[in-house]
Amino acid sequence: MIWGDIVKSHPEHLGKLNAQVTSLNWYYDYGAKKENIKVFSDHGLKQYVCPSVSGYSRLVNAYDMSFTNMREMAKLGNQYHAVGFLNTDWGDCGHINMPSLAIPGMIYGAAQGWNVEDDRDLSTIDQAISLVEYEDPGKNLVGLLRELSHQDIIIFNDLAF
C-alpha cells in the first residue's frame, strides 16, 4: 500500500506500478473530484478511497465536511471500482481534540463504505447515531456535536505555525 498522492503527482510512473500495489487515495475536503479517483482505475490499479473524520488540528471534528467527504468518496470509489474504503483520523498538532469525537464519523464512514446508495439527510443520520451509539432517547447528541463544530472559528495550525 502506498499513499496515492505521491504517485499521482508523478503520473508518468503510474503504469510502472506492480499490479499488487494498492494506492491509498485520500482527499479530506468538500468536492472530491472524479479525476483523482478515475486516474487509478484508468491505469488498472487497485485503490482504497480514503476520506477523513476531519478532527485534525480542531477541538471538535468538522462533521459537515467529513460526512460530505465520506459520501462523495464512497460514491466515487464505487463508480471507479475501488477495492476498499479507509476512513482516516489524523492527530496533527498532538491530536488536540478528544478522539471520541471521531466516533460519529467512524460510524457514518462505515455505513457509507457498505452502502453508497444511502442518501439520507444528515439530521436523520445524526438522530440514528445518537440513539444507537449513545442510547440518547431524544436523538439529539450528534446534532448538538454538529452544531458545536460550527463554532470552531480557528484551527490549531493557525495558532501554532
Image (cartoon, grey):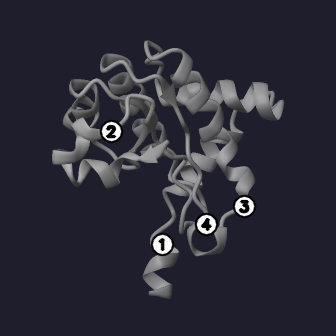
Q: Position of residue 13 (x, y in %)?
A: 22, 46
Residue 131 occupies quadrant:
top right
**For mark 4, does the 10 Å Cα neighbourhood hold few (<14), some (14 to 19), or many (20 or more) residues?**
some
Disc 4 marks a residue whose amino acid type is Leu
Question: First in sequence: mark 2 or mark 3?
Answer: 2
Q: Secondary structure at mark 2?
A: loop
Question: First in sequence: mark 1 or mark 2?
Answer: 2
Q: Secondary structure at mark 1?
A: loop
Question: First in sequence: mark 3 or mark 4?
Answer: 4
- Distance from disc 3 to disc 4, alpha carbons, whole Å, reads 7 Å
- Distance from disc 1 to disc 3, alpha carbons, whole Å, reads 14 Å
- Distance from disc 4 to disc 2, alpha carbons, whole Å, reads 39 Å
Q: Nearer the viewer, mark 2 or mark 3?
A: 2
Residue 31 occupies quadrant:
top left
Question: First in sequence: mark 1 or mark 3?
Answer: 3
- Label 2, on which residue? 17
Using the image, determine if residue 145 lies above or below residue 73: below
- Label 1, on which residue? 155
Q: Position of residue 98 (x, y in %)?
A: 72, 61
- Label 4, on which residue? 59
Q: Position of residue 130 (x, y in %)?
A: 72, 32
Residue at the left extreme, as displayed: 12
Q: Residue at x 69, y 42 (%)?
A: 103
**Quarter in which the C terminus is drawn:** bottom left
Q: Secondary structure at mark 3?
A: loop
Q: Nearer the viewer, mark 4 or mark 2?
A: 2
